Structure formats: C-alpha cells, structure tokens
Image: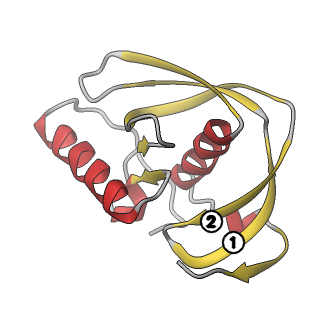
Amino acid sequence: MLRRVSRPVTAFDSRLWELVKDMKQTLRHAEGAGLAAPQVGILRRVVVIDIGEGAFELINPVMTEKSGEQECVEGCLSVPGKRGKTRRPARVTVEAFDHRGNPVRIEGEGLLALALCHELDHLDGKLYIDIAEGSLWEVDE
C-alpha cells in the first residue's frame, strides 16, 4: 500500500471530514509530525501535519515552489525505530484544499518544509528510506 500512488480527492464530504479527524487523532496518539492517508490504508491525497503549532490538513496538495537545501534526520511512523539522513529543500510552498474545499497555501522552511516534503512523498508511494544517505540507524521510540 505504501508504494502505490494515491488518487485525488473528488468529494469534499462528511466521509473526508471523518478521515481527516481520524488521521489527526492517530497523529496525536502516535506523537508524530505528519501522517498521510496511505499510512492508514487509504489511497487518497490527504495529509495532516502538526509540528507543534496545531494540526492542519492538506487535501490534494501540490508543491509549487522549492528552494535551498537542508540536511535532515528523518524517521517515519511507517518505519518505526529507524532514522536516516536525507537532504530536502530548505523552503517549500504547497497549495492544497482544506476538508471543506477551501484553497490553502502553506509556505514552510526548516522542519515544516521537511514535514511537507516527507508527507507529499507518501502520496506518490515514496518513503524517506528511498533517499536516505548511507545506512539507517536504530533509535529507541
């Protein structure tokens, strides 16, 4: 499931709102920074992110700008107990919709840029381990 490309959301309805609420709750419970719908078995282009400033959702997100580079240490709720070194854009802009269909534009740098890149990759069937430099290492969760 994690290697498949997610389909766009076409209905902004109560089922989508339930999915978003469930994903936010799952993210809080797991104490993660982001969660994509494929990680919970749903092949739709839905992401929730919370880097400590409150959770927000992105429906059908598209990265419209990226610049710079940052060295990151990444982990993933789908690859528990592992970390790896990656390189991601330092700044990104993402355009999407909220669960009601309202346009959303997010500009992020640093950790937010990392989270946006990481979660959008999930929607295209990519994992951070695909771009990790060198070996992954074990961490205590």
> Taking 136 as reference, is 43 left or right?
left
Classify mark 2: helix, strand or loop: strand
Q: Residue at x 30, y 52 (%)?
A: 23
Residue reaching furthest to the left: 14
> Taking 33 as reference, is 15 left or right?
left
Q: Residue at x 38, y 34 (%)?
A: 56
- Going by the numbered disc 2, the residue's amino acid type is Gly
Marks 1/2: CA–CA distance: 5 Å
Q: Residue at x 37, y 48 (%)?
A: 44
Please provide percent x and percent y for residue 11: 22, 32
| Quadrant housing residue 132 | bottom right
Image quarter in which the N terminus is found: bottom left
Q: Nearer the viewer, residue 117 or 101?
A: 117
Sequence-wise, the earlier of marks 1 and 2 is: 2
Classify mark 1: helix, strand or loop: strand
Please provide percent x and percent y for residue 49: 45, 42
Disc on res. 75: 2
Please provide percent x and percent y for residue 41: 34, 65
Q: State if disc 2 and disc 1 touch (CB < 8 Å).
A: yes
Q: Residue at x 71, y 37 (%)?
A: 110
Q: Is residue 43 above or below residue 67?
A: below
Please provide percent x and percent y for residue 58: 42, 33
> Taking 94 as reference, is 27 left or right?
left
| Quadrant housing residue 139 | bottom right
- Going by the numbered disc 1, the residue's amino acid type is Arg
Disc on res. 115: none
Instruction: Check disc 2: other Cα within 10 Å, few if <14, some if 14-19, many if 20+.
Output: many
Q: Which residue is mark 1?
A: 83
